[in-house]
Amino acid sequence: MSHHDEDLRHRFTALREEAAREAPEFDGLWRQAAAARGRRRRIPLGTWLALAGAAGALLYAAVRRDAPSALPVETVTMPMLGQWRSPTAFLLRTPGEELLTTVPSLGSAPSLSVLSSFPERRPPS
Amino acid sequence: MSAGDLEHQLEALHGTSFGWALACCRWNRDEAADVLQAVYLKVLEGKARFDGRSSLRTWLFAVIRRTAAEHRRRRWVRALAMDRWMARRPASSAAGDPEAGLAGGETVRALRTALEALPRRQREVIHLVFSEELTIADAASVLGIGVGSARTHYERAKHRLRQELAARGPRSR
């Protein structure tokens, strides 16, 4: 160790001794820290309660908004499936279709009247 | 290590811990006491836990240094948020003048003033080695830097400190 290092060591020793003299008591600082810890523990409890209240209020508001309203719902009458007719069923009707669905009688010519019964191609009103 | 054991060991290191806290707070006694109390609070709350990877003193010094840096940052933010002039006046008067915080003999005051002229890293390394009698490796661990880097800071700090002390006149003890 050089002379300069020795000199520095003496100076720093004096510095350390002075700091030790100036140091506050350990017990005091430790007790204050313990008290601060107790205070910090109490604060979160109140904070948590406030947060829980706010969250509950928000949840309640959200549920209320999504709930179905009390207004009467318009009732819709559904038709029976067997009674349903397609709106374009008339397009399937062809001239003389009665000839295909009736049995002709022997000895008589087919009536031409059936041909006059050409279905009117008009959508049902 | 039980809580009681830790408390006893912290008590044994209290004087030297305060010395290091003073160095981290630029010799502001009140601030150093606040920092040390905050360190004890961290220990009590379990925010700072000694895991045995280093010596207790090295670990404690690292916690003190980090806590002092947090205090410094908080004070800086507060000074920005509040009226700057009003906020800076008390802080600068204590932190800027190393002779104002503590009393002390001529030797100590001259050393403190000379230390203030050093860059922070150099000041920290030389304080840990000479005042707290840590090895350079332990000092590097406290500061979170490499041993080579700590050695460089140490050599530069010694050289600079020699110049600063010489400029302030002959040694007085």
Image (cartoon, helix red, strand yellow):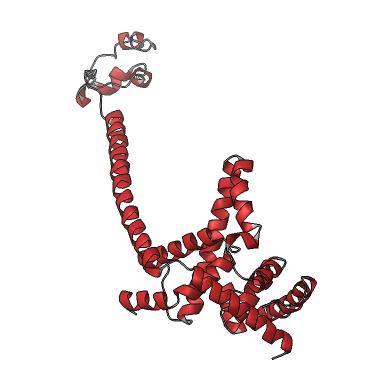
Quadrant hosting residue B125: bottom right
Quadrant hosting residue A52: top left
Residue that appears at 56% across and 79% down = B132
Q: Which residue is nearer to you in this view: B101 or B31?
A: B101
Q: Is residue A40 visible?
A: yes
Q: Which residue is nearer to you in this view: A3 or B123?
A: A3
Query: Position of B137 compared to A58: left or right?
Result: right
Q: Which residue is nearer to you in this view: B36 or B15?
A: B15
Image position, residue B67 (x, y; %): 51, 63
The quadrant in which the C terminus of chain B is found is: bottom right
Is the residue B158 above or below the residue A55 in the image? Answer: below
Residue located farthest toward the bottom when viewing the structure as drawn:
A1
Image position, residue A38 (x, y; %): 31, 57
Image position, residue A15 (x, y; %): 59, 74
Query: Position of A18 compared to A90: left or right?
Result: right
Query: Position of B142 compared to B147: left or right?
Result: left
Residue that appears at 71% across and 76% down = B157
Residue that appears at 69% across and 91% down = A1
The quadrant in which the N terminus of chain B is found is: bottom left
Q: Is residue B140 visible?
A: no
Q: Which residue is nearer to you in this view: A89 or B162?
A: B162
Is the residue A81 above or below the residue A42 in the image? Answer: above
